[in-house]
Image: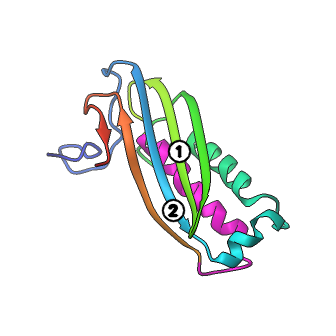
Amino acid sequence: MTLSHYDSAGQAHMVDISGKPVTRREAHASASVALSREVLDALPQNPKGNPLEVARIAGIQAAKRTWELIPMCHPLPLTSIDVKIEIVPDGVTIHTAVSTTAPTGVEMEALTAASIAALTVYDMCKALDKGIVIREIRLEKKTGGKSGDYVRG
């Protein structure tokens, strides 16, 4: 197995996707943010606005700009971005779904959306608690493409 973002001389490069077929591709990712009870109770009264809605919008924006943040990612015509944030007993869980019809997948866009949404929760809540922990940013599922489908087991 070889890493696709390196050429035969070991130099990093952007993969040439010009010969790949255009197909529908979708990826789902998630992230968890551990919040104290104090922070969870304060979410509705946050003076900066609703932290979870701001984080949701940040996740959407991040997916659209992934190619500007991750050096070897291609700019993609995203057809759908969904970011859901759910309050759970110990914090929040972020779920993202990104789709495209393109010659390459959207795993990085889904992961970037989850990451930036989690960082935004931190930013919006850090005044109450600097001990917030972001964890478990991971790909949950992907469909389409040469490597086939993947579902986290």
Q: Relative to 60, does residue 48 appear above or below in the rendering?
A: below
Q: Residue furthest left?
A: 1
Q: Residue at x 53, y 44 (%)?
A: 96
Magenta highlight on residue 111: yes
Q: Which mark is residue 32?
A: 2
Q: Name the amino acid, label 2.
A: Ser
x%, y% of residue 128? 73, 79
Q: Name the amino acid, label 1.
A: Thr
Q: Residue at x 45, y 36 (%)?
A: 74
x%, y% of residue 16? 33, 31
Q: Relative to 26, does residue 18 appear above or below in the rendering?
A: above
Q: Residue at x 23, y 43 (%)?
A: 7
x%, y% of residue 19? 30, 20
Q: Which mark is residue 96?
A: 1
Q: Which residues are magenta?
A: 107-131
**Residue 79, picture quadrant:** top right
**Residue 81, picture quadrant:** top right
x%, y% of residue 26? 44, 32
Query: Horizontal placement of 45 versus 37: left or right?
Result: right
Nearer the N terminus, badge 2 or badge 1? 2
For disc 2, the neighbor class at 10 Å (few under 14, some 14 to 19, many from 20) is many
For disc 1, the neighbor class at 10 Å (few under 14, some 14 to 19, many from 20) is many
Query: Horizontal placement of 51 versus 109: left or right?
Result: right
SS at badge 2: strand
All told, the count of numbered labels is: 2
Q: Is residue 69 visible?
A: no
Viewer-side residue, 63 vs 75: 63
Magenta highlight on residue 122: yes
Query: Horizontal placement of 110 versus 129: left or right?
Result: left
